[in-house]
Image (cartoon, rainbow, N blue to C red):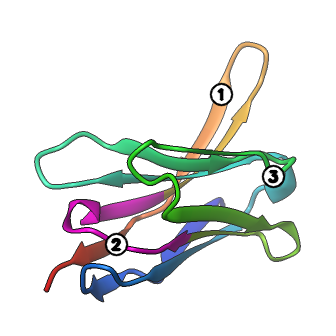
Amino acid sequence: QVQLVESGGGLVQPGGSLRLSCVASGIHFGVYVMGWYRQAPGKQRELVATITSGSYSNYADSVKGRFTISRDDAKNTVYLQMNNLKPDDTAVYYCNAELEFVQSTREYWGQGTQVTVSS
């Protein structure tokens, strides 16, 4: 059974920092592209950052320079370090694991962790 379990969310003041973690089980973690997505109330889910098996990372323009994605394949864990948080970063953050094949894609999601940025 595949599980992605996020942790590290919470309430933080503007300008503060949080570190999200996602532990994966039931998959060959090292070959998956891992990502973080977020969904704010009334909005569609959007990409925050992804990191490939070779540790190449990609970020949404809105978080570049503030967020850092990383992975530890020995621990089956992907992290999202979030600095200089803004109220617009408030959302449920979801962990994603994706593996592309020639004619299909295998994808898994975590249950989400709430991040609230407010004074």
Image position, residue 117 (x, y; %): 23, 76
Vertical arrangement, residue 24 with respect to residue 33, above or below: below
Q: Amino acid at mark 3?
A: Ser
Q: Residue 114: where, in percent of width, then height?
A: 30, 73
Q: Which residue is mark 3?
A: 55
Crowdedness near tag 3: few (<14), some (14–19) or many (≥20) residues, C-alpha within 10 Å: some
Mark 1 or mark 3: whose residue is earlier in sequence: 3
Residue interval drawn in magenta: 81-94
- Which residue was labeled with disc 1? 105
Q: Quadrant of the C terminus?
A: bottom left
What label sits on residue 59 in the rendered view?
Answer: none
Quadrant of res 100: top right
Q: Horizontal and vertical percent for residue 71?
A: 75, 65
User: Can you say whether 12 is above or below 81 in the image?
Assistant: below
Using the image as rendered, state which of residue 40 and residue 76 is in the foreground: 40
Membership of 85 in magenta stretch = yes
Three-letter code for the amino acid on which mark 2 is drawn:
Leu
Q: Secondary structure at mark 2?
A: loop
| Residue lying at 14% horizontally and 55% vertically, measured from the top left | 41
Q: Are marks 2 and 1 in contact (CB under 8 Å)?
A: no
Regarding mark 1 in the picture, which secondary structure is present there?
Answer: strand
Tag on residue 85?
2
Reply above or below: 98 against 18.
above
Foreground disc of the pair 2, 3: 2
Neighbourhood count class around disc 1 (C-alpha, 10 Å): few under 14, some 14–19, many 20 upward:
few
